[in-house]
Amino acid sequence: MDNKEQSISALKASFKNAKAVFAPNFSDKYQRNNKRTGRKNLRCFPCCSKGGHFPRRFCGAPVEVTLKNFDVHGSEFFAWAGFTTTDLSMFTPGQIVLETRLESLRRDRAHPTAPLMQSTVPEKKGKSTHAFSINKNNMGWHYEWKSNKHVRYDKHCLKVYIFVRAPTEGQLMCLGSFNSPEFTIYCRRRISKSSRSVKKKKASLAPTSESKKRKKIEVMSDSSISSASSVSSSSSSCCDSEDCACNEKIGNSKVDFDFNAKLIPGFPVARDPCYVLEQNLKRKKQIKTEVNKKRTIMRPAASDVQLFLSSLAHLRAIHA
């Protein structure tokens, strides 16, 4: 076993007792914006900026990570970070990775949607304590994760991977990873005020079947109320006219018409009470004349009655 293999085995043994502390404090949920450029940035991650919340530009801060109980024995290590769900990992302990591959996945100004972020050079704070920062340049916290209704409650984290140089030149070996505090993501699409108003207008102009039924009920109730009110209001003014149907008398008494009662089938329905009364009176007279006609048709003539009586008397005389 050469020196490189011995140092790697010593780093593996030391890494088993290592612990990571993340700062500043994380929230339990974050909003993710969906931009037209394809970027999906987490807002206010892990907290708002030092100057306070900025609603119309980048709002967030770098993540400070402190590794404790990790003695590197004079060797160097490298830290890379990326967002993922808590049950997944891009690299496994002991995996050998090419440096060129990590460089192809590194996020920078030219590739703002790359999945991995390289940390700053780890700074030694003690014999077995090291500190480094992630996203020190505030390039935005892009997270390429496809959400749907089935996975919207999944837990996510910022996973930090620790690499050391492998025995072969140009290769790195993953010692393990650390998870940040868990959080959930909710998305909110930006909608302009104009589009919101247009959508509301379209919704109001396209009523559903339930709204149509509701409108019909409202129209019927309004018509009944207006008819009842018009009866009370027009009875005093309309009935003062001599030509009005309300003043028509049958016999020696004035017609007493109940506007709230159900009308006879075939009667017209209108909002004007005088018109209703006039039409109903005409209909009553029409029914009366039809009944009288039927009675006259069924009534026998006087000559027929005399003939019947004489024949009846003749029959009685014969039997007597």
Image (cartoon, rainbow, N blue to C red):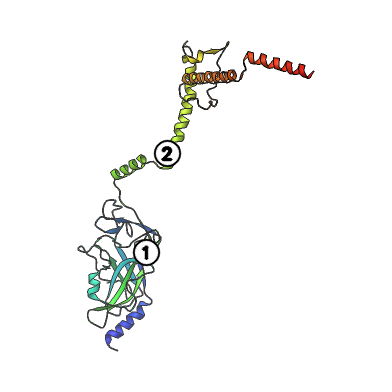
- Residue 107: in sight, yes or no? yes
Q: Position of residue 201 (x, y in %)?
A: 33, 40
Residue 294 lies, with reference to residue 141, above or below; the image says: above
Residue 283 lies, with reference to residue 37, above or below; the image says: above
Q: Residue furthest front?
A: 318
Q: Which residue is mark 2?
A: 212
Depth check: 148 or 129 in front?
148
Q: Secondary structure at mark 1?
A: strand
The quarter in which the C terminus is drawn is: top right
- Point 53% across, 18% down: residue: 285
Q: Marks 1 and 2: CB-CB under 8 Å?
A: no
Q: Position of residue 125 (x, y in %)?
A: 30, 71
Please tell me in which quadrant of the rendered image residue 152 appears.
bottom left
Residue 54 lies, with reference to residue 143, above or below; the image says: above
- Residue 27: in sight, yes or no? no
Q: Which mark is residue 276?
A: none
Q: Which residue is mark 1?
A: 156
Depth check: 164 or 185 in front?
185
Q: Position of residue 312 (x, y in %)?
A: 72, 17
Decide: few, some or many residues near mark 1? Use Cα within 10 Å; few <14, some 14-19, many ≥20.
many
